[in-house]
Amino acid sequence: MTNVLYLPTRYFPSISGAEFYIQRIAEILTSKFNYNADIFTSNAVDFRALRHPEGKIIEKTDPLFDRVNNLKINRFSITYNHSFEDILSELKKLSFFNSINITDNSVKKYLINGPYLKSLIEFFLRENVKNYDIIHTVFFPYFNIIISLIIGNFLNIPKICTPFFHFSNPRYLDSNMVDILKRFDTIIACTQIEKKVLVNKFNLKAKKIAVVPMGVDIKRYNIKEIVKSNKAYFKEKFFATNEKNYKLILFCGHKNYEKGAISILKAIPYILEKIKKVYFVFIGPSTKAFNYELSKILKNKNSRIINFSPDNLTGYYDNKKIAAFREADLYLMPSRSDAFGISFLEAWSAGKPVIGARIGATPEVIRENVDGFLVEFDNPEDIAQKVIKLLKSKKLRKNLGTAGYLNVSQKYRWELVAKKTHLIYQNLIKNNLTKI
């Protein structure tokens, strides 16, 4: 049996691509490849809690606190209001930290992002922990990356990081911070583009970077489920009685500038000039900037906007979310901050066309004019033009959506992702045993 230690920033009921990636890999490796997977993480639920005490956390009384889908979860409280100088002083007393060879300034930047899990570090250095074979963490640039290196060095086991590197976002291009990725035995990039950036721009060794895409549980989104029940659940429940024939445009993700949510809001007036009968559905955590822009758009009497937050959902496979993907006419996420974009796979699983931004890793994920369209990032008029083009042609939507579905079914199932990850693990473990 292979013992793997996972160290994500957060874990379910937190909902985002990086956390879900660890969850599905851990679950599949445990059920199909005879792994023992232990999850060590923070008690944060939202991103704010990673660095601020006013963020949302999961309480110990919650039934999901220490077990999710038969996996044991070890959650540790985050240390807030800390002094950078005091933490640096504590860390530098650890030889396993000093061997990482990271600048003080970079450590401070990682600490600002959080989560600082002092009790987790102390747990591993104090307790007689089991013999782990490998440690795997996500994602850049959060402090659990540093913690995983400390623990990996202490246990003398191979260290893996899937950084989900948002290289199109200027905030993530600090070379001193990226340099820490060189300390891992293997980096798993989601696309070849991400790998090329890490190699060519930041001088990581190509041989230490494996490319494994994201995955999807395709059956959950299959449009045939609606045909079987002969009912369009989402439109029946949330569209006005006399508006059931309106088109549905879906966005799912963090409602911020980086993900393109605000650009979508700005594109709505252009779209409504040509097509009046359309609903815009937004699913995901909100932001002040999004809410401000939304308040302006809602002044247009023709605007039909349905806005869900995680508080309105029951989990990653919430019925409302699944139904929205199944019944959408197109999926729209013109983001510049995605290392891949699981939601594109979800849309294709439902046979829907997608629109993404022509930036970052997205042009490798979306095959332009084959299974979707690409637009210029933060260009509302370009977004509107592509949306209008798709809404005016049912045939085009069907052709793009069908091509996406076929591609997903062949390449992007979670089982395939887990199998590729399993092979990476076993190769690293074998090489490590040879060294010993």
Image (cartoon, helix red, strand yellow):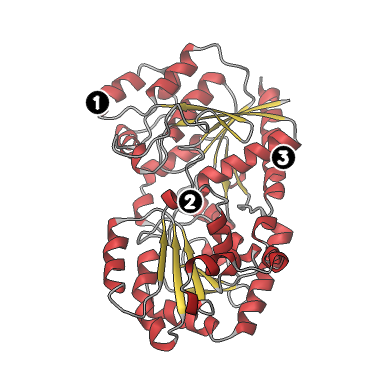
Can you tell which of label 2 and label 1 is closer to the viewer?
A: 2
Image: 392 above or below 211: below
Q: Secondary structure at mark 3?
A: helix
Disc 2, disc 1: CB below 8 Å?
A: no
Is tag 2's residue or tag 1's residue first in the polypeptide sequence? 1
Q: Residue at x 36, y 59 (%)?
A: 256
Mark 2: few/some/many CA within 10 Å (<14, 14-19, 20+): some
Q: Secondary structure at mark 2?
A: loop
Q: Which residue is label 3 attached to?
A: 423
The amino acid type of the residue labelled 1 equals Glu
The part of the image, by quadrant, that contains residue 380 is bottom left
> Label for residue 85?
1
The percent position of residue 138, horizontal first and vertical second, equals 50, 40
Can you tell which of label 3 and label 2 is closer to the viewer?
A: 2
Mark 3: few/some/many CA within 10 Å (<14, 14-19, 20+): few
Label 2 and label 1: CA atoms lie apart by 40 Å
Q: Residue at x 42, y 44 (%)?
A: 178
The amino acid type of the residue labelled 2 equals Leu
Is tag 1's residue or tag 3's residue first in the polypeptide sequence? 1
Left or right, 276 with reference to 233 = left
The amino acid type of the residue labelled 3 equals Leu
Image: 184 above or below 262: above
The percent position of residue 152, horizontal first and vertical second, equals 53, 25
Q: Residue at x 63, y 52 (%)?
A: 215
Q: Which residue is label 2 attached to?
A: 313
